[in-house]
């Protein structure tokens, strides 16, 4: 049995990459992932990638931030240390809208940064996981899971017909920078 985990088709041009995706999908070859050094418009729809749910996460982080700061201010100004300043109420809501807004933005920004690092496994100090190092520079890569898939020779032929410059059979999942 082959130790190949992934078959990589490397392309020079994004149009050839899109053509390669079409050919693979027409031949019912499931694509593991596509790596590109730049954004390619329309590739999400072609690969069937769903819309991101990060907007919901951002909304929840904002709600948590607004609630936390509003609760802290209410507790401090009404229960913990109420002050009588000129007969004004202890907790006048309009006075605290700016700081509530700022904390909402702060919690959203930090929450989204942590969510991004968690979702992409790009924690600070960790070596990035890439299929081929040239995918970050000048090559467009289609990765196909080789285990239990169409015969490797057929996949190689499809990629060559689509215009792949190079075809690699990886026995490891990721390449490190070291």
Image (cartoon, rainbow, N blue to C red):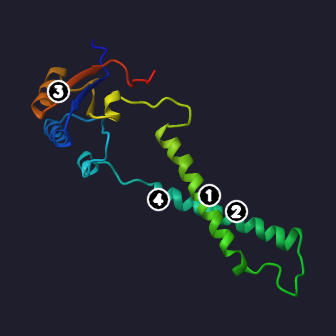
Residue 66 image point, x, y percent? 65, 66
Mark 4–mark 1 distance (CA, rounded to whole Å): 14 Å
Q: Residue at x 56, y 36 (%)?
A: 124
Mark 4–mark 2 distance (CA, rounded to whole Å): 20 Å
Q: Earlier in the sequence, mark 1 or mark 3?
A: 1
Mark 4–mark 3 distance (CA, rounded to whole Å): 37 Å
- Which residue is tagged 3? 155
CB within 8 Å, label 4 to label 3: no
Q: Tell me: 130 left or right of 27.
A: right
Q: Earlier in the sequence, mark 1 or mark 2?
A: 2
Q: In the drawing, what numbered circle is on residue 55?
A: 4
Give the vertical position of 41 relative to 36 (above or below): below
**Mark 3 secondary-structure assignment:** helix
Mark 1–mark 2 distance (CA, rounded to whole Å): 10 Å
CB within 8 Å, label 1 to label 2: yes
Q: Earlier in the sequence, mark 2 or mark 3?
A: 2
Q: Residue at x 23, y 30 (%)?
A: 10
- Which residue is tagged 1? 107
Give the vertical position of 88 relative to 9 (above or below): below
CB within 8 Å, label 4 to label 2: no
**Mark 1 secondary-structure assignment:** helix
Q: Tell me: 95 left or right of 41.
A: right
Task: Between residue 39 and residue 49, name the one nearer to us.
Answer: 39
Q: Residue at x 35, y 28 (%)?
A: 133
Give the vertical position of 71 relative to 87 (above or below): above
Tag 4: Cα neighbours inside 10 Å, few (<14), some, or many (≥20)?
few
Q: Residue at the far left: name it.
A: 161
């Amino acid at each position: 049995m082959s130790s190949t985990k992934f078959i990589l088709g490397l392309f020079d041009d994004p149009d050839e990459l899109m053509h390669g995706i079409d050919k693979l999908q027409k031949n019912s070859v499931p694509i593991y992932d596509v790596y590109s050094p730049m954004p390619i418009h329309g590739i999400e729809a072609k690969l069937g990638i769903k819309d991101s749910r990060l907007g919901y996460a951002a909304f929840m982080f904002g709600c948590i931030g607004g609630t936390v700061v509003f609760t802290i201010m209410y507790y401090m100004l009404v229960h913990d240390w109420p002050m009588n300043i000129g007969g004004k109420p202890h907790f006048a809501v309009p006075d605290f809208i700016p700081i509530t807004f700022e904390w909402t933005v702060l919690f959203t920004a930090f929450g989204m940064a942590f969510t991004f690092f968690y979702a992409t496994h790009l924690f600070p100090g960790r070596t990035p996981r890439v299929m081929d190092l040239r995918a970050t520079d000048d090559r467009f890569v289609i990765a196909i899971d080789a285990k239990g898939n169409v015969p490797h020779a057929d996949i190689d032929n499809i990629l060559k017909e689509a215009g792949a410059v190079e075809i690699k059979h990886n026995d490891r999942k990721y390449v490190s920078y070291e």
